[in-house]
Image (cartoon, rainbow, N blue to C red):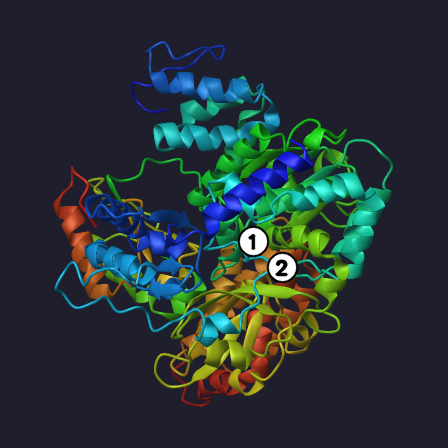
Amino acid sequence: MDLQELQTLAEREQEILDAPCIRCCTVGGCLSANALAVKEQIEVEIATQDLNPPMQVRGVGCMGLCSRGPLVRLDPAGILYDQVTPEDAPELVHACHKTLQPHLPKALSNSSPLQPSTYQPRHHPFFTLQHPIVLENSGHIDPKEIKDYMAQKGYLALYQALYDMTPSDVIDQITQSGLRGRGGGGYPTGLKWSTVAKMPPGQKYVICNGDEGDPGAFMDRSVLESDPHRVLEGMAIAAYAVGANQGYIYIRGEYPLAINHLETALRQARKQGLLGSQIFESPFDFRIDIRIGAGAFVCGEETALMASIEGKRGLPHPRPPYPAESGLWGCPTLINNVETFANIAPIIRNGAEWFVGIGTDKSKGTKVFSLAGKIQNTGLIEVPMGTSLRQIVEQMGGGVLDGSAKAVQTGGPSGGCIPAHAFDTPVDYESLTRLGSIMGSGGMIVMDQATNMVDVARFFMEFCMEESCGKCVPCRAGTVQLYQLLTKICDGKARKEDLESLNQLCEMVKDTSLCGLGKSAPNPILSTLRFFKDEYLTLMHNEGSGDYHPP
Amino acid sequence: MSEGSQTIVDGKPHPSGDQRFRVLEATMKRHQYQPNSLIEVLHKAQELFGYLERDILLHIAHSLKLPPSQVYGVATFYHFFSLTPSGRHTCVVCMGTACFVKGAASLLSTVEQIAHIQAGETTQDGGLSLSTARCLGACGSAPAVVLDGQVVGYQTSENLGQQVTQMMDHPQSKVAT
């Protein structure tokens, strides 16, 4: 394929994509709410109602508002229908047809017209406060069709990189854009890329970390399910920049649909000559293979992930050497998260300047969050860095179901709980760290007044205890001790001095563990101790009552 | 080693003519019997046989020229692999954070009480396997449960209890959830 072919194809497909269309979300949350049956019924209805001209139906990726699924949207009008059932199909098709052709004779059916959702994409803050970059195609294109992706300027950035830029130009653009790793740590992406690029020529690898193990996080899954080509393109650009010819996507085995969509995408990209040998008829070769994870949280840690790709137990090893120097099979390896790769193509296409204009001083661009918990609107959102938690929780999320919010948990087991009084904090890497939490991969769980924070801390500790790989003692034994201490507190059997040991043990596990899992395991305890100490204190055993016997 | 199982020699297809071994063989061949394809091969084996019997692990170890201890070590390290057969019906309760704050713990204890088993166990008659998941990524419809492979959201203890009882009353066929 050359540029001319790509552009002709893109233009032709763009017209088809912009034509009136009923879009049905057929991934993730909507799928578990029977979305496939809805789409099939809509297709049946269009055939039986014999519409002229026939209406397009497209199975697309996530539209964001997962709690109201299955979602169906009529485009270009942008009318959203939520909680659609297969029984709604006749009315829905009729209503859509009428909207598209206002001159049409009156209702075909006598039943009351189907009410569009109250969540109008053009007016509701859940949609208007978003700034989609990573998710710009999500909910719009069919993830199983490479042509849909091309119509959205897909693979153009790869072409640009290969023909108009040298590898160091690409790295300069990424460095200037200020993009930071979206997997949680926030390490400057450009710096990571240049470290790998500087290694002597030879075998190098690019790995996409799609092992989204954080409970309460589903951004990577949504991106992979809704727009898999975006990630492949990002990886190919990265490979060109650092001089790699082989890539791996490590993806959770728990995400069968994402794996399926990725496999389809890989097949199509290979067929079109966009992956494999001599991409775009240039001397650049790049192959990508999928590696399916087998359920181990520790494999999200990069050194453990590489061990797993090598077919071994996912045990981490101390750094240095960093993967950039000695990674997969001892070769220089670039590892980035799904969302980081998804940001690459737009940066190359629009330039670093454009990206720098979005976000805050030190955190550029946007961040995708999965908003869940006790909140009105749960789902996937993408907001500019620096948006306040209050905007996210109260405006976009529509507030807590009943009552008021108590805290937001970010960053999963490696993160912490942010109390409601700190909701005006802008969301960026530094602000969250100051509050004792982290950006993490982007899980955001809202908790209401009924949530017991000690119990939450114990929940995360149980998770870390069971997920500890057991290689280093502080993590293996420390998490067990922490869990037992928390259980003792929850059972009302602990004394005040136990709080002191809890604190000390947290610091010890944090300072001495080998990898990120152990280092961050105490975070949920430390952050709840900091902001919700009262809850710990009220659970303390009343000394002197004499009914407590140590186990 | 379970009764009736046969040892597989030289990585050739199983003498019983079990077609599943052919598929397994093809998978290993596609990976050129590379030791680093172990996890991929175990995935395939579990997909084919439902669980990883000792015999199969030995067969894979032999074919990929890996020490059985390493194959066993990998198979037991990852949660996804099971060395015991699962029940005719499965119930997986998601214990992700979103589900947790919305009461997943009480869902789990409801099922535990009905089936008289703990998470990770199978009922004595092999009718139901109960397990927990770290996070299904279906946080939008929390609390979520997977019944016989199908994700169902917005569960309540009552609702789930009814469905599980129904599953246990229909030991053979799968019930619509």
Answer left or right for B170 relative to A287: left
The one nearer the camera, A487 or A549, is A487
* Residue at image location 76% in from the left, 50% down from the top: A319
- The residue under label 2 is A518
Q: Position of residue A547 (x, y in %)?
A: 38, 83
Q: For residue B142, say whether it is visible.
A: no
The one nearer the camera, B125 or A303, is A303
The one nearer the camera, A425 or A494, is A425
* Residue at image location 37% in from the left, 28% down from the top: B48
Residue A246: quarter of image:
top right
Report the amino acid beneath label 1.
Ser
Which sits earlier in the primary sequence, circle 1 or circle 2?
1
Q: Position of residue B118 (x, y in %)?
A: 30, 53
Label 1 packing within 10 angstroms: few (<14), some (14-19), many (20+): many
Dot 1 lies on which element? loop
Dot 2 lies on which element? helix
Q: Quadrant of the C terminus of chain A?
A: bottom left
Q: Is residue A510 above or below residue B21?
A: below
- The residue under label 1 is A468
Q: Position of residue A352 (x, y in %)?
A: 76, 59
Label 2 packing within 10 angstroms: few (<14), some (14-19), many (20+): many
Residue B38: quarter of image:
top right
